Image (cartoon, rainbow, N blue to C red):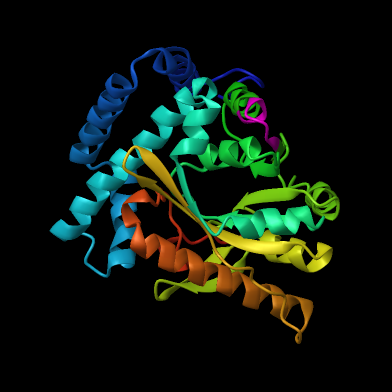
Amino acid sequence: MKRPQGRLSVADRIVAAGYSAGWAVTRHLPERVAGWIFQVIADVMWRRRGKSVRRLESNLARVIGADASASSVREVSRAGLRSYFRYWVEAFRLPAMSRERILGGMRSTGEQVIFDNLGRGRGVVLALPHMGNWDVAGAWLVHKGHPFTTVAERLKPESLFERFLAYREALGMEVLPLTGKNGGSGMAFGTLAQRLRAGRPVCLPADRDLTASGVEVEFFGARTRMVAGPALLAIQTGAALLPAILWFEGRDWGLRIHEEIPVPEEGTRREKVAAMTQSMADVFEKGIAEHPEDWHMLQRLWLDDLEPRPASAS
C-alpha cells in the first residue's frame, strides 16, 4: 500500500528526532563530554562494521593502496569514523561557537588568494571535497567578512532539510537546494553565476557527482565522476577556481587553499571543463592521501563500484 502523501515513515521520524535532539542537547554539554560521547558512538559503529563502514573501508583501500580487509585499512577507518562523528558534534555545537574560537582555531595557508581576488571585485569558486569540517570553514570565511553562496543536497524528511537550511543560513551562508521537492536538477546555476559576477564567493562540494551530468576523471587510479559546476562557473563568469583541502589538526582545523586552476587557452568548452575538473581531482587526490582519515566518503564513488542501472522495460 502506498504511503499517503506527506506522511513520514517511522524511519524518517527517527532520523528527524535524532538530529533535533543533537542540536538541542549537544551544544549544552561540555565540549570534552560531547566529544567523548560521539567517539564512543563512532567506535561502536566501527566495531559492528555495517554497510556504511564497509563502504568507507572500500574507498579508503583505494586511497592507501591496500586490500579493503587489511588491518591498515581498518585502522584508518576507525580514525575516519571518529573524524566523521567529530564533524557532527561540532556541527551541533557550531551555532554556539564563538567568533574568536573559529578564527583562532583555523590553521589556514594560501587563503590570501581568496581575499586578493575578492578585493579586486573578482568572484571566487572554492571547490572542496567532503573533508574535515566544511561548516566551520564556511563560518571562518563569513567571519572574515565574506558571506558566500553554496548548494545543499535535499534530505529526507523535508523537515530535516529545512532544519539544515536554517542552520547554515544562520551561520551566514546563502544555501540553494541542489534538487527540487519533486526531484530533478534544481541547482541554481544562474544564481551562482550572478553572485560570482558580483564579485562574491561561491563554495561547492565537488568530489561526488549528484547532478547526473558529471565529468569523468581519473582518481586514485580509477574512473569516477565529479561535478562540472565549478569549472563551468569559472569559464562562464571569469571567476577564480580555487580547490581547498580541509582536515582536523588537534583541537583545531586545517585549511589549505591551492593555486587557481586556470581556464585552458585552447579546446572546446567541453574539453576545457574536462581538463579543469581533472586538475581539481588531482588536488583532491593529493590532499586526501595526506589526510585519509578526514575524508568522509561513506557512499559509492568510483564507477566500477556503482550498481548497474536496471534495463529499461521493452
Q: Nearer the viewer, residue 7 or 148?
A: 148
**Quadrant position of the N terminus in the picture:** top right
Up/down of 75 relative to 159, above or below: below
Q: Is residue 199 left or right of residue 102?
A: right
At x 75%, y 53%, the residue is: 118
Task: State the image coordinates of residue 16 (x, y, percent, origin top left).
Answer: 50, 20
Q: Position of residue 76 (x, y in %)?
A: 24, 53
Instruction: Count up the numbered dots.
Output: 0
Q: Is residue 169 magenta?
A: yes
The image position of residue 106, as x and y in percent, is: 47, 43
- In this orientation, does residue 227 appear? no
Question: Where does the magenta region start and end?
Answer: 168-174
**Residue 27 is a magenta residue:** no
Task: Locate residue 310, reporting x and y percent.
Answer: 53, 58
Quarter holding residue 40: top left
Q: Residue at x 40, y 60 (%)?
A: 288
- Please, which residue is most extreme toward the left here? 71
Q: Nearer the viewer, residue 117 or 216?
A: 117
User: Residue 49 versus residue 11: which sits nearer the camera?
Assistant: 49
Using the image, determine if residue 67 lies above or below residue 248: below
